[in-house]
Each structure stands twice: as C-alpha cells, then as structure tokens.
Image (cartoon, grey):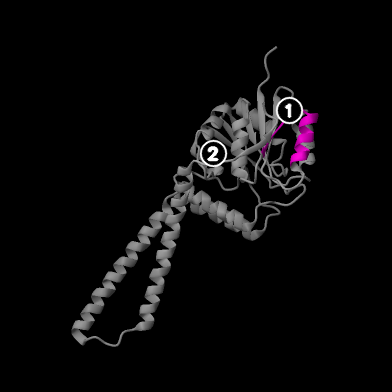
Amino acid sequence: MAKKPLVSVVCPCYNEEPMLPLYYAAMNERVLARLTDYDFELIFVNDGSKDRTLPILRELAKADERVKYISFSRNFGKEAAMYAGLQHAKGDFVCVMDADLQDPPELIEQMLARLNDEDRDCVATRRVTRKGEPKIRSAFARAFYRVINRISDTEFVDGARDFRMMRRCVVDAVLSLGEYHRFSKGIFMWVGFDTVWLEYENVERAAGESKWSFWKLMRYAIEGIVSFSAAPLQLATAVGSVVSAVALVYMVIRVIIAMIWGNPVAGYPSLLAIIMFLGGFVLLALGIIGEYVARTYMQVKQRPIYIQKETNIK
C-alpha cells in the first residue's frame, strides 16, 4: 500500500486557552475526517502563554498522537513561533494558520487540490474584506501596502494572510533565511516559487481577543519596511542634501546682503527656527539609521530566534 502524503499544520499560540478546543474540534470535523488520503500532524507552538494553553496542548497530545507541541521559555513573538513550527514540520506539504479560526480550516482541502491539480508550489490566502476590523486599522493597513509596494522590490499583496500551504521546497527556502528580525509576509514573497492566491471574506475570531494592538501592528509595519527596503535611508539622504543646498544658498544671500547693506540686527527668531528644524531632522535621520544598525547588531550577536522549553516531538 502506497504511503500517504504527510501534511504538517503549524499553529502559533499565545494565550489561546478559549480557542484551542474550538480549533481542534474544527480541524477534526472539517479537515482530518474528510481528507483521508493524507496523514496529518498538528504542530502547536506555545509562545510563552500565561494562561492554560500549555496544559491544554499536553492533554490534546495525550489523546491524539497527531498533536505535537513546542513550548517556548518566554514570549518570542509570532514570527519566532512560525519559524519554530516550520523547523519541526516533517510534512510533504506544510500549512501555517492561526488558532483563532479566522483562517477557515475548510480551505485546506482547496489548497491541497490546487497544489496537486495545478502543479503549484504554494497556495496563499488573502482577505477581500475587513469586516469587523476597526476602520482606522483597515485604513492604516491599506496605506502600509501602498507604501511598501512603492519602495520595495518585493511585491506585497494587500490583505495577505500568513495562512498558506507550501510544498517542502518552499519551506526549505524560507528556513534557509536565518534572519533574526523576521517579516514572514515579505520572506514568503521574496523566496518566489509558483504561488496562487485564494480569496475569502474576513472571518471574526470565534472566541478570545486579538493579541495585536494598533501599536504592535505599527511596529510590525516598520519591521516590514526596514527589512525589505532601504528607502528610509535614501529619503534621509535626499532630505539632507536638499536642506544643505538651501542652507548654502541662504548663507550666500546673507553674505551678499551684509556686503551691500551692512550687517543688520540678527534675526534670532528665524535663526532659532532653523536650528530647531535642522536639529529635528538630524534626530530623525539618526533614528532611521539606528533602526538599521540595531538590526545588524542583533544579527551579528547570533542569538537564537527562540528558546525551546518543552516539546513532545522526538
């Protein structure tokens, strides 16, 4: 009898106590019970949760040998959790999805079908609506995609989710990029491969609360821009050049005026305004440079992306 293809489903978890039973039940009903031509392993990555996420994972693993889990020593972030899950995935096909059921499990069947029928390397997903999301958050998200697509050589798809199904070759390529500061939406696109997109309506969380605050998302957006574009540095250089040119012209004009009409009383208010403007710009430029230097510093130190405390994966 031919060996069934193995599908690994990687699921990062942070304080998902109310969601895990719902997610596991949904996966059993909508995926595992239906796709009998495949073997599955469900890899949960506990990202330093403070609730009962880890005890629930232990119970699920005892009841179902397909359930695997990795538990971190502290909260390292979703990017680290996805990386750990991909590292431990053994499947011929690997899927990444969230535990909040905003990624519809029933799409997994379509993903596998399109990978095989159309001979694709990856099936990714994107939301075509942002139902239930605060308007200001949606506006900033759309603005982020417009900006980063203008300044980056890597194409970013508006509404793209981390929810995707990949062949082993894609997973190996993603893992070959050992970046400390990871921005997976960009990494998935940067490695290339033949990718097709599945579109679906936004689904609200089945239980619990989102761990992504507005400011966390803003920080994540900055991570993406700095990781996949040097435009902020180029902008600082351009503005600095323009300011220097204007200052030079102004200096020449003041010298000419002083030679012709003498040296009038100094304009201290205008001088103060110029100094404050230049000081502000210098601090902004230093901040931009600091973002890139900090990433280089963290990469050079070669700290691990995560520290594993417990696992049942052998």
Q: Nearer the viewer, mark 2 or mark 1?
A: 1
Q: Which residues are magenta?
A: 54-71
Element assignment for label 2: helix
Check disc 1 and give the amino acid type.
Arg
Q: CA distance from mark 2 to mark 1?
A: 26 Å
Q: In the rendering, at what x and y percent does residue 125 appear?
A: 62, 40
In the rendered image of this protein, does residue 127 appear above or below residue 66?
A: below
Check disc 2 and give the amino acid type.
Phe
* Crowd tier of the residue under label 1, counting other residues whose Cα lies within 10 Å: few below 14, some 14–19, many 20 or above: some
**Residue annotated with mark 2:** 188
Q: In the rendering, at what x and y percent does residue 276 appear?
A: 41, 73
Quarter of the rendering occupied by the N terminus? top right
Q: Are marks 2 and 1 in contact (CB under 8 Å)?
A: no
Question: What mark, if any, has residue 32 been given in the picture?
Answer: none
The image quadrant that residue 103 belongs to is: top right
Element assignment for label 1: loop
Question: What mark, if any, has residue 66 been given in the picture?
Answer: 1
